[in-house]
Image (cartoon, rainbow, N blue to C red):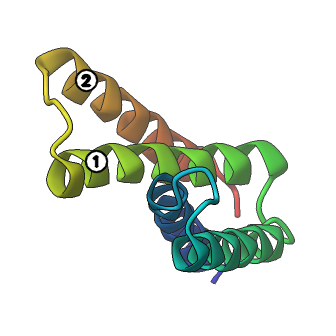
Amino acid sequence: MSWFLLLIAGLLEVAWAAGLKSSEGFTRLWPSVFTVVTALGSFVLLAMAMRQLPLGTAYAVWTGIGAVGAFVFGIVMMGEAVSAARVASAALIVLGLIGLKLSSSA
């Protein structure tokens, strides 16, 4: 269950990052509200997952999901540039996340 909570927390991190971009520096009300709500949800679920997962593992996986998710979201939804180096770098993050999951005792 803690891994599922961590996954949802990571996806909410992607959502609040996208909301932050859309809020234009918190100058737009509804994207700003969305950002705050999804960030709070992400933090709460991360805290719940950390009850059973090691700090370093949970935090690294949470930020990794957020980083790779925001990377993919930026490419797919915002037309950001794709290059072999960027994709390879994101793939290395994913490999690190898999390694953390496989080596975790929780």
| Residue 36 location (% of width, % of height) | 70, 72
Residue where numbered disc 2 is placed: 86
Residue where numbered disc 1 is placed: 74
Instruction: Say above or below: 50 vs 45.
Output: above
Q: Amino acid at mark 1?
A: Gly
| Residue 58 location (% of width, % of height) | 70, 54
Q: Specify the farthest residue to the right.
A: 51
Q: Amino acid at mark 2?
A: Arg
Q: Quadrant of residue 68?
A: top left
Q: Quadrant of residue 18?
A: bottom left
Question: Residue at (63%, 84%) from the top-left corner?
Answer: 1
Question: Residue at (80%, 77%) from the top-left corner?
Answer: 48
**Between residues 18 and 60, which one lies in front from this camera angle?**
18
**Between residues 92 and 82, which one lies in front from this camera angle?**
82
Point out the image quarter for the C terminus.
bottom right
Instruction: Say above or below: 37 vs 23.
Output: below
Please state if 32 lies on the left or on the right of 94 as rendered. Answer: right
Question: Residue at (47%, 52%) from the top-left corner?
Answer: 21
Instruction: Say above or below: 38 vs 54.
Output: below
Does label 2 or label 1 sit earlier along the sequence? 1
Q: Quadrant of residue 88?
A: top left
Label 2 environment density (alpha carbons within 10 Å; few <14, some 14–19, many ≥20)? few
| Residue 29 location (% of width, % of height) | 60, 75
| Residue 74 location (% of width, % of height) | 28, 47
Alpha-carbon span between mark 2 and mark 1: 12 Å
Numbered circle sitting on residue 37 = none
Question: Residue at (55%, 57%) from the top-left corner?
Answer: 20
Please state if 39 lies on the left or on the right of 47 as rendered. Answer: left
Secondary structure beneath label 2: helix
Please state if 62 lies on the left or on the right of 43 as rendered. Answer: left
Secondary structure beneath label 1: helix
Mark 2–mark 1 CB contact (< 8 Å)? no
